[in-house]
Amino acid sequence: MNRNRRRSISRAIRRKQVNRNYKDSLFRMIFGNRKAALKLYNAINHSNYQNPEDLEITTIEGAIYMGVKNDLSFLIDSVMNLYEAQSTRNPNMPLRGLIYFARVYQGYVEKRELDLYSGSRIKIPLPRYIVFYNGSEEEPDRREYRLSDAFEKKQDSYCLECVATVLNINAGHNRQLMEDAACCGSMLLLYPRCGSIWKCTPKIWRVQWTGRWKNVLRKAFLRIF
């Protein structure tokens, strides 16, 4: 492979990674605060929590491990939630989730100074992993990916499992969820539209997104809606 060919492939890989980071930033921009996350949680779980202070954001900022970057993680009512937005089909989400959950639970234990060597059982939050799909490929309203499906050797039961529930949020899919989201005042209904506008956003704005203009651009972008 000649030098120019290698450079071309390298640039393509970098562009793909940058675009993925933009979409992650967009999702977190919209739902990354307590109030918005709470509305989204209410829409998905048919709950009616009103106090954003009941929700603890556990997102690991800038977390990249083996290519894994999280969108949003939070704790409420003894449930550790991991939400991600994806525009492509990815059956490896359970493995990504497992790696991220491990880090989140490690932070949970350290923050509360829990003793893993104690003779009494330590209670931990229930994990729940939701992936919001808004890609162009045809997908059902709901799909589950299991970590055990990736195991090279099969057996009746496993000592480890992680389930990623994928919800299609494109137009015409999961109508009840989208109606509930609208009733809760959640931006989930508009997220696919936000993504379309984001693709048209000038590149220089995207570069500044991680800089000191982040809050200014966030307010300007959301004002469209």
Image (tube, helix red, strand yellow):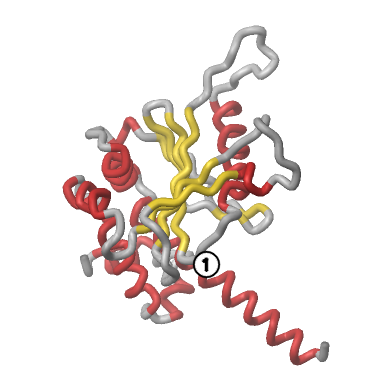
Give the class, few, some or many, for how many residues have Cα within 10 Å of label 1's Cα (few <14, many ≥20). some
Residue 122 rendering spot, x and y as whole percentages: 57, 16
Position of 131 relative to 210 (above/below):
above
Q: Is residue 216 visible?
A: no
Residue, disc 1: 20
What residue sits 35% from the left and 47% below the top?
A: 33
Vertically, is 50 above or below 96? Answer: above
Name the residue: 34% across, 59% down. Answer: 169
Looking at the image, is 11 positioned above or below residue 90?
below
Three-letter residue code for mark 1? Arg
> In the rendered view, does 202 fall on the left or right side of 109?
left
Q: Residue furthest top?
A: 119
Q: Quadrant location of the N terminus? A: bottom right
Left or right: residue 139 compared with residue 11? left
Residue 116 to residue 70: above or below = above
Q: Quadrant of residue 75?
A: top left
Front-lying residue, 152 or 111: 152
Which quadrant of the view contains residue 77? top left
x and y percent of residue 70 in the render? 52, 52
Residue 120, horizontal then vertical, whole percent: 61, 8
Which residue lies at the image location 40% right of the left edge and 51% below the top edge? 142
Res. 208 visible in picture: yes
Label total for image: 1
- 139 and 5: which is toward the camera: 139
What SS does tag 1 mark?
helix
Residue at x 22% of width, y 34% of height: 48
- Drawn side of residue 172 relative to residue 84, left or right: left
Locate the C terminus and report the quarter of the image it occupies: bottom left
